[in-house]
Amino acid sequence: MTVKVQREDFDVGAELAAMTRGRTSIGGVTLFVGLVRDMAGGAEVSAMTLEHYPGMTEKQLEAIEAEARARWPLDDALIIHRYGRLEPGDQIVLVATASAHRDAAFDSCHFLIDWLKTKAPFWKLEATPEGERWVEAKGSDDDAAARWAKES
Amino acid sequence: MTVKVQREDFDVGAELAAMTRGRTSIGGVTLFVGLVRDMAGGAEVSAMTLEHYPGMTEKQLEAIEAEARARWPLDDALIIHRYGRLEPGDQIVLVATASAHRDAAFDSCHFLIDWLKTKAPFWKLEATPEGERWVEAKGSDDDAAARWAKES
Amino acid sequence: MKVLYFAWLRSKIGVATETFDPPAEVTDVGTLVEWLKTRSPKHADALANSKVVKVAVNQEHVAYDHPVSAGDEVALFPPVTGG
Amino acid sequence: MKVLYFAWLRSKIGVATETFDPPAEVTDVGTLVEWLKTRSPKHADALANSKVVKVAVNQEHVAYDHPVSAGDEVALFPPVTGG
């Protein structure tokens, strides 16, 4: 189980190989790789800068990963999230979940990325032709995370 | 849009890079990598051999990929499926779907792998301590594919 | 006509491919399978239970009432087990 | 007490971190934010709408009635926008 918050890019093939090497109980790995799109909210985005709260970010990512492990039978889980300046086409985030059961791998990966896209302590500064602007939190993303809420 | 049915292993990182290189409209890529597990149906499996129907397999995989493209807004889709002798820990299948929208990437990838695991024209010969045996089709996998049936 | 067998059908019959000119009574998949059963005891055994013998003609899944003709590629195989 | 500002709170206030001994009337997050507003017009402007000012004490999200004391690390930030 690994969480990395880093400025550097990551190598999806190498991370997958490290997760699966020598392990024969894993039936499948679901991965999601998030990329910077050149369009956001209708305006052209030439770059964005992700700011975060070092220390708290890692704590929160570790907590949500632990929740995923508690809810699904996972052999392994990995979250890598970048911060700093990113350009269109750049990789932002990798989530990988490994399980004997592919539904568990899919659902836990989807759960984690929905959380990361809405609740992870990052703030986005977008560079547009009209200058820089801080992105505001979106309701539609909250809906995506809310679907995973457990009935109590 | 690519379908490959091959004996050789594949490089997930290289395939992902080829899919996303120079493209800035993709918000995310969902990937599923299927691996050979050492346990199947309770018995120890030391190896398995996937047989297929060359020609028909590719046709069917291309048809299901076209269906995924029709049902979800995808920038790209890739299926690589191996055949021949595979050992525990080996990669069997890669599905990757790229979209501006992560739900579309998740759902289409899940749809494709459920289909591949149940309907793709492959037959499994497992090597166990008691000898080789042809695997029979499973009802639980059919249920997984059935969930994607469209209401007419 | 070219007939291909896969998986345990191939193992049981002992050949992967047969090429022949079918007799006149073979007009569809059903009559083809019945005629194939007469070719050897192995054929008869492998094809005994048609519920587990699926058929493709020219690489398309078909039912037993699908017509077949001399130039077709006919494949017989068990239910697929997926990848 | 160490106070950190993130995103547009930091841009508006013009500093990322402040360290000070808070006065006696600062007992919880709410009284801390009120006192911070008195430090400069930029603070007052940035912190004007408490609905969009989230707070963490010692790296845990808290409500405005959460107590604060001299040794705490308090972070003020807009709603997160995710990764």
Image (spheres, coloured by chain):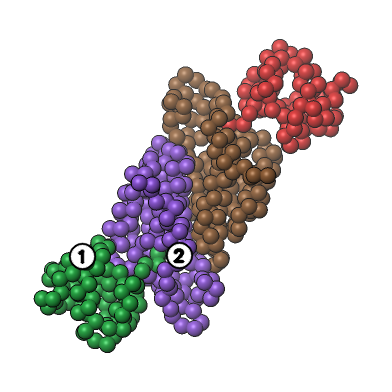
Chain colours: A purple, B brown, C red, D green
- B45 lies left or right of A57: right
The chain carrying label 1 is D
Residue C20, disc: none
Residue of label 1: D66
Residue at the spot x=60%, y=58% of the render? B73
Residue B121, image x, y percentages: 63, 35
Q: Is residue B65 in view?
A: yes
Residue at the spot x=13%, y=76% of the render? D25
- A108 lies left or right of B95: left
Residue at the spot x=34%, y=72% of the render? D51
Residue at the spot x=27%, y=68% of the render? D55
Residue A125, image x, y percentages: 41, 74
Residue of label 2: A139
- C71 lies left or right of B126: right
- Quadrant the C terminus of chain B occupies: top right
Asked whether D46 or C37 is in front, the reply is D46
The lab-note entry on whether marks 1 and 2 share a chain reads: no
